[in-house]
Amino acid sequence: MDSSNIIVPENWIPCSESLIKVVGVGGGGCNAVDTMNRQGIQDVEFVICNTDRQSLDNNSVTNRLYLGNKGLGAGCDPERGRRAAVESADKIKKMFADQSEMVFITAGMGGGTGTGAAPIIAQIAKELGKLTVGVVTLPFRDEGESFLKRALIGIKELRKHVDSLLIIDNQKLYDVFGELRAFEAFPRANEVLNTAVKSIAEIITKTGFINVDFADVKMVMKDSGMAIMGIGTASGPDRAAKAVEMAFESPLLNDCDLNTASGVLVNISSGKENGLTMIELNQIMEYVNSYTGTPEKFKRGVVLDESLKDEISVTIVATGFKINNLPQIDIGDPDTIVLGSGSPFSQESISTTRLTYPNQESTLQEQKQEAEMEPAETSENGNEAWVYRKPKGKPALIIEPGDDITKLEREPAYLRRERLLGKEEESRQEEAPSSAGMKIELSDGIDLTGDNSYLHQTQD
């Protein structure tokens, strides 16, 4: 159709700028965006921000923002990174003063600039009305406890200022790429970030037979909390089943219960030569529904991608999880820790950093138990010390054979308590001696039995 025949509103303003902006923050974020820029993502603008001028100068991305005034980096100090971003707040606002509607902020958490500056940049973007999505990595565990602690603190701060937060755990790369050589495996972390951003961006930028537009993505991701995603691509026989299975086994998926998702996006792409059949579409959707149930917000898209040829690609984005749905992270948590003036460690240096699945019923009791400290006689050098003993009480959620853990986790604490009390009462009734056949007689005299506990030694 001739463009002159297209009817548009009187005040229509054509958009010549990219709808999506991808901002890399810090060394890890800038490296990831450099990889994305070299590989190319359709209709996306890239920007890199760092306190390290040398890192920016060696990057292929031309849109650069120098944070702070010194250009010497943040030295793994998130506070320095935060201050640098605050000093550059006017520049950051100017960077977002365009027609972009969605901002991806990507960073490797645990260092200085990415950990400290990313929350400030996200806050400015969200205040300007952008749909703000954080895509960040958790460090490898062997990078050190302090690195992981900084990462977790940064993630908790970042989640306050983004609509949706996608966390990629680098530790999973050991499981997925464990057989690769180190120089081949480490770049895969950037590839995983690239895949995450590219997949979500192309859901919007590529039109399809069943289209997913920006409004659909905004519906699912706006103020949605933590997000997870999976991608799978397969060809040949049973390609649809293989692709969707790969998507649900993706290293991008943290171990969350997908039935608790409030929003789900499914995008299915296939080539032109051997396109998606209706049977394959039905197979994929049945598989997805078996995992996700019926979320409140759901949208699927079907796209033609000629680069796929015989392949089918399935992308799944699920949102609405709490940050407590992260896999448990437990560092240096022995059963007993001795604290005192004679200990070579401070209490702060050995404190445990954990993200767990909390049970509200037992939280207060566990906190009380963990706060209890038993005085020890002496430490090794003779000084008074305190011994912290890890609670070893009854678990808050008892799983019995045949129980559905998902059902139990959703069951309110008061109902679970009533059910458990009911079982205990039934058990007591079964253990009590039966009164059937017993004959009770009343006599005028006083009859003392030989086993009367009130006349003999008290029974404990």
Image (spheres, rainbow, N blue to C red):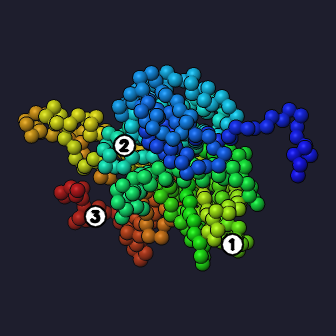
Bin the neighbour count of mark 2 within 10 Å (Cα to Cα): few under 14, some 14-19, many 20 and up: many
Which residue is under mark 3?
447
Residue type at the position of mark 1: Asn
Q: Report, in whole angstroms, how far the alpha carbon at label 1 lies from the one at label 2.
A: 46 Å
Q: Report, in whole angstroms, how far the alpha carbon at label 3 lies from the one at label 2.
A: 74 Å
Where residue 303 sits: x, y (%)? 70, 60
In the image shown, does 371 or 182 lie closer to the viewer? 182
Which residue is under mark 2?
148
Q: Nearer the viewer, mark 1 or mark 2?
A: 1
Where residue 178 sits: x, y (%)? 36, 62
Residue at x 19% of width, y 58% of height:
456
Bin the neighbour count of mark 3 within 10 Å (Cα to Cα): few under 14, some 14-19, many 20 and up: few
In the image shown, does 445 or 23 lie closer to the viewer? 23
In the image, is 213 to the left or to the right of 359?
A: right
Where residue 257 sits: x, y (%)? 53, 57
Residue type at the position of mark 2: Leu
Q: Report, in whole angstroms, how far the alpha carbon at label 1 lies from the one at label 3.
A: 96 Å
Marks 1 and 3, the one that precedes in the sequence: 1
Image vertical order of residue 404 relative to residue 112, above or below: below
> Residue 223 occupies which quadrant of the picture?
top right
Whether residue 157 is visible, yes or no, is no
Image vertical order of residue 162 relative to residue 196, above or below: above
Marks 3 and 2, the one that precedes in the sequence: 2
Marks 1 and 2, the one that precedes in the sequence: 2
Which residue is under mark 1?
274
Residue at x 44% of width, y 30% of height:
53
